[in-house]
Image (cartoon, helix red, strand yellow):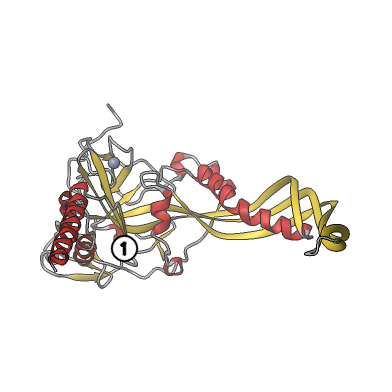
Amino acid sequence: MQNVEAPTEKVHHFPCPSCGADLLYEPRDGFLTCPYCGHKEAIPQSAAEVVERSFEQYLRVRPEQMGQLASGALEVQCQSCGAKSLFMPPEVAGRCEFCGVQIVAQPKSADPIVAPEGLLPFALAQPDVAVKLREWLSSRWFAPNGLKHFAEPEAIHGIYLPFWTYDTNTATYYTGQRGDYYYVTETYYEKDQQGNQVQRTRQVRHTRWSSASGNVSRWFDDVLIPGTVSLSSDRLRALEPWDLSELKPYNPAFLSGFKAHRYQVDLGQGFEHVKVIIAGQIESDVREDIGGDVQTIDELSTHYSGITFKHLLLPVYAGAYRFNNKVYQIVINARTGEIQGDRPYSVLKILLLIVFVLLAILILILVFDKK
Ligand SMILES: [Zn+2]
Ligand SMILES: [Zn+2]
């Protein structure tokens, strides 16, 4: 087992100059902060911009040209959902945030990845989010009592999720049919109220079809594609919007005290998702170009060029809880505080409410009957 090397020495990435403990990123003020002595240190402002990379070049990238999230980063895979967590000591593998199982595999040195270009730092601190989560839970009337687990302070953890964004030029050739409406006056007969046959007219719509062909082009900017498959795309979409204008150039200091997930959707697969997402816009461009009142599209072929991408990390708090053989997931946008989670209903609580309402009605009937 040569490729599985358990780390032996403890690596300090951002040692506190006063006490030697690890400085952690504090979302409340954006400083690296010592949890023991309170020492604070600013993360150096980077003059670098979050740049876009050429897609074609990176598709042929070799592992030795790839990077690391941080030197000494560790990686461990969840045996249940397959998500790969990347973290820096003193973080530990712990529980999978998406499916709630305890991760038993030994962490190994992280394999190289396409290094992130930028990230949105955590803006909300774990204790503040935990308070919001407790409020959210108490507003879930029919939630089973087991979900109270999420009210525990350590129920959620901060993780950076991997995303890709792509820019691309598109040039689309199409052939199709253009339909224009025209109206014809038709004569018909009917009986009036006196039963006499009368002649009337009406307008009837027809469509004149003619063949159409042409080219449309459009530039797509920053199409966001999740790099994770451990969360459903619906759940991820519900966490939007992300304030991507606030992106910071990647710096491992932002990860201190958090985990990151390795992308499971690779660069090439991500672009296939882009094609699906932008197809609707291209189709409506084609319909507009054909014109007329109705259109049919017979053939459509799109050429993509000048493709660039960014690998981004976006911050969430997440936790999962297993209860009655089901997994309940909670994910929170760590920029906006938007909470997305399973809203299970307790059958028992609903039945109790129904019984209560029926009893109340019965009592009312009895009371009014006596009068
Ligand atoms: Zn310290
Ligand atoms: Zn998992």
The residue that label 1 is drawn on is 334
Query: Residue 299 placed where, x, y %?
Result: 75, 44
Q: Looking at this rendering, what residue extends furthest in the front direction? A: 194
Query: Residue 96 placed where, x, y %?
Result: 25, 44
Quadrant of residue 195 within the rendered picture? bottom right
Q: Amino acid at mark 1?
A: Ala
Relative vertical location of residue 300 with respect to residue 138 in this rendering, above or below: above
Which residue is depicted at the point 27% across and 35% down?
A: 79
Q: Is residue 76 visible?
A: no
**Label tally:** 1
Q: Describe the element under mark 1 as helix, strand or loop.
A: loop
Which residue is depicted at the point 23% across and 62% down?
A: 133
Query: Residue 136 placed where, x, y %?
Result: 24, 63
Where, quadrant-wise, is the N terminus in this rendering? top left
Please give left or right for residue 87 compared with residue 279 in the image. Answer: left
Quadrant of residue 102 within the rendered picture? top left
Q: Is residue 237 visible?
A: yes
Pick the front one: 360 or 149: 360
Where, quadrant-wise, is the C terminus in this rendering? bottom left
Q: Looking at this rendering, what residue extends furthest in the top direction? A: 1
Picture quarter with ligand 2: top left
Pick the front one: 158 or 354: 354
Please give left or right for residue 338 compared with residue 234 in the image. Answer: left
Within 10 Å of the Cα at label 1, are there few (<14), some (14-19), or many (20+) other Cα atoms? many
Pick the front one: 8 or 188: 188
Which residue is depicted at the point 16% across and 70% down?
A: 39
